[in-house]
Image (cartoon, rainbow, N blue to C red):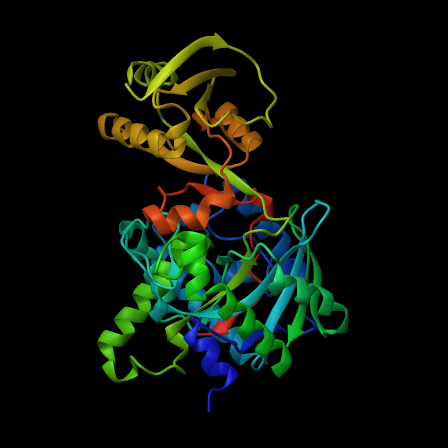
Amino acid sequence: MITIGNRLRALGVAIPDILLPVPTVDLYRWAVIACDQHTSDPAYWHRAGQIVGNAPSTLHTIFPEVHLNEPDSNDRIKRIRNTMQSYLDDGVLTAHQSTTVYLERLTGGEHPRRGLMLAFDLERYDFSATSSSLIRATEDTIVERLPPRVRIRAGAPLELPHIMILIDDPEDRVFGRLQARAPQLPVLYDTELMLGGGRVSGYAVTSPGDFEQLASELERLGDPQRTRARYNSESPLLFAMGDGNHSFATAKQVWEEHKRRDPAQAENPQNPARYALAELVNLHDPALEFEPIHRMVFHADAGSLLEAAASSPEFELERNTTRRHTDSLPPADRIILYAGGQYHTLRLAGGGNTLAVAVLQRFIDDYLRSSSGAEVDYIHGVAEVIRLADEQQAVGFLLPEFDKGALFSTVVRSGPLPRKCFSLGEAHEKRYYLEARRIL
């Protein structure tokens, strides 16, 4: 007999056992933004720490990447694991068995962004450039970035995800039905999010009818005939990474190591380490905005960097230097270099047929190899680039908009995009940690 669980597992997902804070926990202080945000702004994390204090919080169970290179990393990882275990032992978290969470996130726009928490099968995921797996990376995975993340996840009793995974559902049949169902579903949480994160509400989805509907809609999206018609491919791409590409790759690496240690568990679909919890989101959600991820170069002389760009065969420097509104983005064939209060326009030598982020990343990588001490960071939001460039005498590169509608077909045709190519919304719209799941 083919059960709903078997149908979902054939699609690379499972209904998780969700852990949420008990009602006495202050969710405003519990939920904090994804650890890979504000990596050049320690003040943000200091403010978060002041809000949280000693209260139960996901801040005590994550490793903000702004601190990754600090010398106390081993002690911090130990504290994270101990805190996770204490939250389990002391009853801070309560289990919701066989429950997925339908959530709505408001960040100031007209529509809420809708999501669904699912456990994704790491056996159905391959982040290599030639992958044809059901779950695929959308950006290059930098394997060198994984070891510190593996150290954090390996041995941790819990995962708290900031990962967002996309489906290509232009008819909105998965989330349209869930949104209509929300008034009849039990409310699991409803809270304002700290430091401008908006508000999020979560609803318990537990009925076999809802799971059967979910399985049917995902089967529709993964149907081979649809794949051939929509992407001209025989390899179904059902789930594409949105945010948290390296976190999902980390979970994959930890699972592969788990299999090496215990080969008998490799085929066990009940092993919690085989899955990673993530939020499923529709690519076509009207509240889901794709934002370019801009580049900042620190500890570099702005004049020499501008000169290097002007002499690069990749760019043509437009000699006009003008003030622009800080919320404006360049057209597809241009990049804006900002430094010292001035904006300089770099036209792509290849025109609009060249992916701007790929050209810029090559240029920055080459520049860093020849410039001692310079560092690059990846920043969400034009205003944040301008602020950091002004405050830290850095050089910002503003990229054009990203066409989200072309994401699935591009990945099917050409493989993953360059690293840090796009972002699901701006920094304050990123996923906040709220739900947890046992992985040991």
Nearer to me, 347 or 340? 347
Occupied quadrant, residue 137 = bottom left
Q: Vertical placement of 256 versus 206: above or below?
A: above
x and y percentages locating residue 105 in the rendered image: 66, 55
Q: Residue furthest right?
A: 183
Task: Give the x, y percent position of residue 136.
Answer: 38, 58
| Residue at the image position 61 percent from the left and 52 percent from the top | 285
Looking at the image, residue 317 sits to the left or right of residue 390; the answer is left
Q: Can residue 328 be seen in the rendering of this structure?
A: yes
Q: Where is residue 182 in the image (x, y as percent from the top left)?
A: 72, 68
Query: Residue at 30% across / 17% down in the picture?
Result: 308
Is residue 254 rendered to the left or right of residue 14?
Answer: left
- What residue appears at the point 25 percent right and 29 percent down from the top-left corner? 366
| Circle count | 0
- Horizontal and vertical percent for residue 421? 42, 41
> Residue at 50% of width from left, 39% of height from top?
403
